[in-house]
């Protein structure tokens, strides 16, 4: 198996080297041309030219708005919050701040409220310990705060089970704050759970894509906008495109603005 893996890696590296040696990277897909594919280099270039002429190329719309903050306030921090933040970034295409600091003598809610007051984040999801009276999950949607009590998630023969439970409850806190509520999807982490055993039985410790999209729509009211790679023409139609930097963008810029000046009486049609 080692020899096979090494051979495959060498072949991949040679293919990549040949692709870059060709010297053509598609401005549409951002991928280098690889010989032996379904289309020839001339066909790829012709397709890219048509797309570039129509769209003006692609630009990146930067993400903006407040960030979600996930905090590990336990006496001994773990890597759990880092993994939840990583999946949050992948699922939402939004950034997420991670903090690891003990809450000291402050109560869990007071500690989370102090974090909200510091930088006005989108939400605060905190993991705490040292409080037996606190439920496993406490959510305050109006304040955009969720608190996970790791002490109530211990137990069992597997020492890693508690961290998996903490991760699931962090996702549930984010989901409840984001307006998802209980999910109708069978394997979503937003199912109603009333015991640790029911929480353990769930094999999908994250929010499903449909509910993730619902939560993203919720964040718009707070000025959150995820990063996106969109056509330059779309940016011109929406009115936020930067000035053109090449002849292709300049042609699209002038065409869109001339159509806007003529107005709808001249049959301007803007795609939804």
Image (cartoon, grey):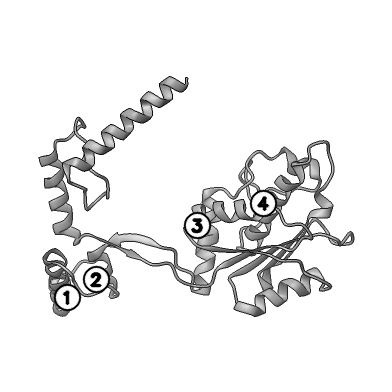
| Quadrant housing the C terminus | bottom left
User: Circles 1 and 2: CB distance less than 8 Å?
Assistant: yes
Dot 2 or dot 3: first in sequence order is: 3
Residue 252, position as x, y percentages in the image? 15, 67
Closest to the camera, between mark 4 and mark 2, is 4
Q: Nearer the viewer, residue 271 or 134?
A: 134
Dot 3 or dot 4: first in sequence order is: 4
Left or right relative to 203: residue 160: right
Closest to the camera, between mark 3 and mark 4, is 4
Query: On residue 257, which mark appears?
Result: 1
Left or right relative to 26: residue 170: right
Closest to the camera, between mark 2 and mark 3, is 3
Closest to the camera, between mark 1 and mark 4, is 4
Query: On residue 171, which mark appears?
Result: none
- Mark 4 crowdedness (10 Å alpha carbons): few <14, some 14-19, many ≥20: some
Query: On residue 80, which mark appears?
Result: 4
The secondary element bearing badge 3 is classed as: helix
Q: Nearer the viewer, residue 53 or 14?
A: 14
Q: CA distance from mark 1 to mark 3?
A: 33 Å
Q: CA distance from mark 4 to mark 2?
A: 42 Å
Residue beneath label 2, please? 236
The secondary element bearing badge 2 is classed as: helix
Tell me the residue at 22%/53% (across/down).
27
Dot 1 or dot 2: first in sequence order is: 2
Q: CA distance from mark 3 to mark 4?
A: 18 Å
Dot 1 or dot 3: first in sequence order is: 3
Dot 4 or dot 2: first in sequence order is: 4
Residue furthest out toward the right:
133
Residue beneath label 3, please? 92
């Amino acid at each position: 198996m080692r020899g096979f893996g090494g051979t495959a890696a060498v072949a991949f590296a040679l293919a990549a080297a040949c692709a870059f040696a060709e010297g053509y990277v598609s401005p549409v897909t951002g991928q280098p041309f690889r010989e032996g594919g379904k289309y020839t280099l001339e066909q790829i270039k012709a397709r890219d030219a048509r797309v570039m002429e129509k769209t003006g190329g692609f630009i990146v719309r930067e993400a903006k708005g407040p960030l979600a903050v996930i905090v590990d306030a336990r006496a001994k921090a773990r890597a759990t919050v880092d993994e939840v933040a990583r999946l949050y970034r992948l699922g939402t295409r939004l950034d997420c701040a991670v903090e690891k600091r003990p809450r000291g003598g402050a109560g869990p809610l007071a500690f989370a409220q102090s974090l909200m007051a510091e930088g006005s984040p989108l939400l605060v999801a905190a993991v705490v310990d040292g409080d037996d009276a606190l439920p496993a999950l406490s959510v305050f949607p109006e304040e955009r705060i969720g608190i996970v009590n790791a002490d109530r998630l211990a137990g069992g023969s597997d020492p890693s089970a508690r961290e998996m439970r903490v991760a699931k409850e962090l996702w549930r806190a984010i989901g409840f704050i984001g307006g998802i509520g209980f999910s109708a999807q069978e394997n979503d982490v937003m199912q109603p759970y009333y015991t640790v055993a029911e929480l353990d039985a769930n094999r999908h410790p994250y929010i499903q894509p449909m509910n993730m999209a619902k939560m993203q729509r919720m964040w718009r009211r707070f000025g959150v906008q995820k990063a996106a790679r969109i056509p330059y023409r779309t940016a011109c139609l929406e009115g936020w495109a930067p000035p053109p930097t090449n002849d292709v963008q300049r042609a699209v810029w002038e065409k869109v603005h001339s159509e806007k000046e003529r107005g709808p009486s001249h049959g301007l049609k803007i795609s939804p």
